[in-house]
Amino acid sequence: MNFGRLTLDPSQKAFEAEARRLLEEHWTPDPHIIALDHDRPTPELVEVLAERGWVHPRTPPEEGGAGLGAVEARVLTALFDEYRVPGYDNDLILPTLRKHGSAELKATVLPDLASGRKSYCLGYSEPDSGSDMAAARTRAVQDGDTWVINGSKMFTTYAHESDYVFMLARTGPVEDKHRTLTMFLVPMDAPGVEVKPIWAMGRVRTNMTFYRDVRISDAYRLGPVNEGWRVVSEPLAAEHGKGDFDALEDLNGGMGAAFTRTLERLVQYTVDWATQTPGADGRPLIEDPLVRQQLATALLDIEVCWNTPGEFGKVMAAETLIRHADALADLTAPAGILSEGADGAIAHGLIGWARLFAPGTAIYGGTTEIYRNNLARGVLGLPRAR
Amino acid sequence: VPIELRWNDYSLSEDDADVRAMLREFFAEQSPPEVVRAAEPLGFDEALWRAALRAGIADLSLPEAHGGQGAGLVELVLAAEEVGRTLAPVPLVDHAVATRLLAGLPETHPDLASAVAGDLILSLAPLSARRPGRQLVPSGAVARGVLAMDGDSLVLLRRESAPEQAPNQGSAPLAWWDAADPSVERTVLAGGDAARALWRRAEAEWQVATASSLVGLAEGASLIARTYTTQRKAFGTPIAAFQAISHTLVDVHEATQTARNLTLKAAWFLAEEPDSRPELPTMALANAARVATDVTMKCVHVHGGFGIMLEADVSLYHLRAAVWGQVGGSSALHLQTIGARLDRAATTATPPATTVPAPAPVRIPSATSRPAADLITSRES
């Protein structure tokens, strides 16, 4: 066990200073953005990061990363959080590309994804299949050396700013479910790909994507035909926060930590509001025992989130954010639900915003029910869910 | 402002992993449900206590210089978890924390040797710094000495024999101790700031160790529930295959792992950097107490009617969960303590501009009549 301070050595301090300098120069943080998913850094900043291998800081330089140590990588994560830089990397699919990609794909596509100059989005969900991902119906039919893709994908977040879609497609009878799926990397600029925005609660943009006779070379297939379910299982597990935890990372995983930070900032806004707002007796509301109890509960629940390990970290953080976003809107009633800019609005409208943003956190990247199914079988060894 | 980074390493050292394995084996063997039931209603098994002393478990965290095993708070926390997992009817946590407090006095106390040997069982009154008057003391019905705050003084209360148990649903050896009782001999051990500092430390240690015993209790109940639901069939399948059951079991498991992590983290900070996160021990206890009661309730439920039967082992856990979790105070009291962090979080914000004259200070709804701000300040280290 060790939770002690980590003292940066001179070269690590220099690294921090250099990273700060670059962020100051190439990035204008918006301090009132308190959720960093569903967004990407600007192309200018991506180029700055990619040049240095900082999109994948721990990956060796020959594979497009920077080969940084755990400490430098953690410094970078902390600075991205401080400067409100949206989380961005291709970590989820790079191992799959290296393992299953064709020689041509590795020569032409992999380098730019490895550096981070190009990016991907996930083509899993469809209008008729979400949690039951293996029920996908988007079809890929082989025609000589090419594949012809027809179908549509839902919630293709980042599709409008991505270069490729990591696509789960049907290559046989749909009745065979898991046994007739194949994975492809489809260029978003291929003729026949169309992106339509979907606006979700909390100013979140995602997309619906359509594929009409999209032709791609067989070189863009990932892994054997009809073995897509096996190919996609590794990136799925990684997305769900499985994997080795090193002693510098947040215990509750990428999404868990992101949601927890969002809630921390909401609570700080609410504390500021309660400090500046007098109650009926003229004393600041922060001195009101009921207000204190509510905010102390939030502090306790946030600490619980930081201590929730692995895959369940996302579930705990999502459900905690949902609960407290509503509770904070109630605590600050009625001002909390006013939009930013409205007369009497508080905390830049973020408290009301949070209860609109919160429900998605328990859905995207896998619903909390799917996480519980996986944990029941994978961790507790319980029989397959009915 | 340069960033401050901390390690986030929850792994036990090899030595501590061995200690945990030894403790787990001892309590699994020595404290099966038959032993737990046989010790009811008092909740004390003299033979088990002696065995724990002989095995170097009851005095594990007591100073070597006075005859103990010389391990630290983390090892006490590990022992407490195994006590909880098996509901072992021994006053290990209360006695260890009280004896560690006695051992921390500048001068060797005459009772220390017999306390370390386990012949004199000690306990402490966890709410005595907050509520004046007589105290409901955990392990108080088996102890002949109790440490408490009495106003500004840290006192040792001694009796020739332990007082009567206060009957309770958890068969815990709770008893009322009253400094004003003529059969109680009261000695002042320290006063003023020194007393408060010693007490703060003991209170935090007790909160962390008690949290750990609640984690063990929750884990014990959840293991029983998991076994039962994979064996019990309904509608032609083990009931653990139904999401209503399996998701509950996941929640119970994850809440327990999380409560353990928070407790270990609190123990580390208390041992290594007590002033950095002074609210963590209270957080660990507040969370473990709510987790334990919630977990045992759910574990009883997944047993169906069998769960509410007294002969079901899971009922032993539910009977004890609230008693163990609440003898150190209510969640509202813990949240008042945790709320001290709000004042630090609020330091950057400007106070309201108001011309309304300030009324009387806010009163907290508890037995103490001190203003909330005063209470919080007194908790700051």
Image: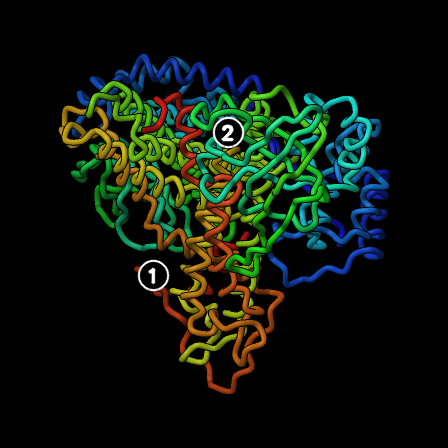
**Which label lies toward us, 1 or 2?**
2
Could you tell me if residue B102 is visible in this image?
no
Q: Residue at x 21, y 29 (%)?
A: B303
Q: Residue at x 47, y 70 (%)?
A: A337
Q: Residue at x 29, y 39 (%)?
A: B293
> Mark 2 is on which residue type?
Val
Residue pointed to by mark 2? B74
In-front residue for pair A65/A231:
A231
Q: Is residue A344 left or right of residue A147?
A: left
Do badges 1 and 2 share one subunit? yes
The vertical placement of B237 against B357, above or below, is above
Q: Position of residue A76 (x, y in %)?
A: 74, 43
Q: Residue at x 50, y 59 (%)?
A: A201
Q: Residues within 10 Å of mark 2 (few under 14, many from 20)?
A: many
Q: Disc 1 versus disc 2: distance between alpha carbons?
A: 32 Å
Residue pointed to by mark 1? B368
The vertical placement of A33 against B121, above or below, is below
> Mark 1 is on which residue type?
Thr
Could you tell me if residue B71 is visible in this image?
yes
Q: Mark 2 falls on what kind of element? A: helix
Could you tell which of marks 1 and 2 lies nearer the N-terminus?
2
Q: Position of residue A149 (x, y in %)?
A: 61, 35
Q: Mark 1, chain letter? A: B
Q: Are marks 1 and 2 in contact (CB under 8 Å)?
A: no
In-front residue for pair A168/B48:
A168
